[in-house]
Image (cartoon, grey):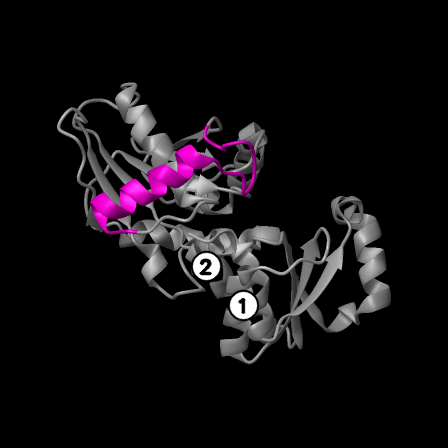
Amino acid sequence: MQPINLPENFKVNLFLLRLDLIDEEISGNKWFKLKYNLQDVIRAKKTKLLTFGGAFSNHIAATAKACDKAGIKSVGIIRGENVENHTLQLAAAYGMELKFVSRNLYRNKEELMQWLSNEINLSQCYIVPEGGANQLGIEGCKEIVSLINMPFDYVAMACGTGTTLSGIVQSIHKNQVGLGFAALKGGAFLVDDINNSIGNQTAGTFAIIDKYHFGGYAKHNSELLNFIKKFELEQNTKLDFVYTAKMMYGIYDLIQHNYFPENATIVAIHSGGLQGNLGIGI
């Protein structure tokens, strides 16, 4: 739990839960999402784990390394044209078989699975959705709250699929709030997805903040990059441009606009993914 040094006029307490320190690549929430899925691959006696993601997907990189360490073969179905970047090079280095598909095919899951059935023996594959967004991923993310060893009012995280927030909201108390900062444009849909995943389970309150996406998933501009550099200088901590930088930028902005009550304690989750920065040279 890292205390964040804030300007004197920021009348809140802000801490960063450093899940990025778990592992250089299987970092942050990815470890929790994969934990029970990897156990289930072994239980189901499958020979491969097959999953999905974009070219900058932290989930792809983390899955590749986790499977390599567990002695499980991995396949990554990558959205879009065949490109080379640090994230995909890392996944390939850990033995992941990468298959690139068009964005149209990627969106049509029925057609995609039909195509895959002609490419791969799916009967031997354990399939994990994009971002580890399944019930086992949620179960793993429920355990994150147990690492917060202090009273808090808000727990904040960057959101792609909403899996992490779904797990966390089910582990906090009713008087606590989970804040999900959407990393992609139009992230309001996450509200329904999270409500559906929670169902009738006891849960705290949550909100999706969808105005700090900087143009969309993996989009960025000079303002965000300057914030990343300034934050590292002031806090001696790196943020990734896809997720955590947008979350922290949003938290700072909300504090300045009096979103949080005075003296509120906010715990922000560092969800790792720092290898993605190398793809844009930061």
Q: Position of residue 194 (x, y in %)?
A: 53, 37
Q: Residue at x 47, y 26 (%)?
A: 211
Tell me, yes or no, if residue 200 can be seen here.
yes
Three-letter amino acid code at the position of disc 2: Gln
Q: Earlier in the sequence, mark 2 or mark 1?
A: 1
What is the distance, in whole Å, between disc 2 and disc 1 at their CAs? 9 Å
**Residue under circle 2?**
275
User: Which residue reaches farthest left?
Assistant: 8
Give the side of residue 16 with respect to residue 82, left or right: left
* Residues shaded magenta: 212-237
Q: Nearer the viewer, residue 246 or 220?
A: 220
Three-letter amino acid code at the position of disc 1: Leu
Q: Position of residue 242 (x, y in %)?
A: 48, 45
Q: Position of residue 267 (x, y in %)?
A: 28, 41
Q: Is residue 112 above or below residue 225?
A: below
Does residue 226 show up magenta in the picture?
yes
Number of the label disc, if any, that sits on residue 90: 1
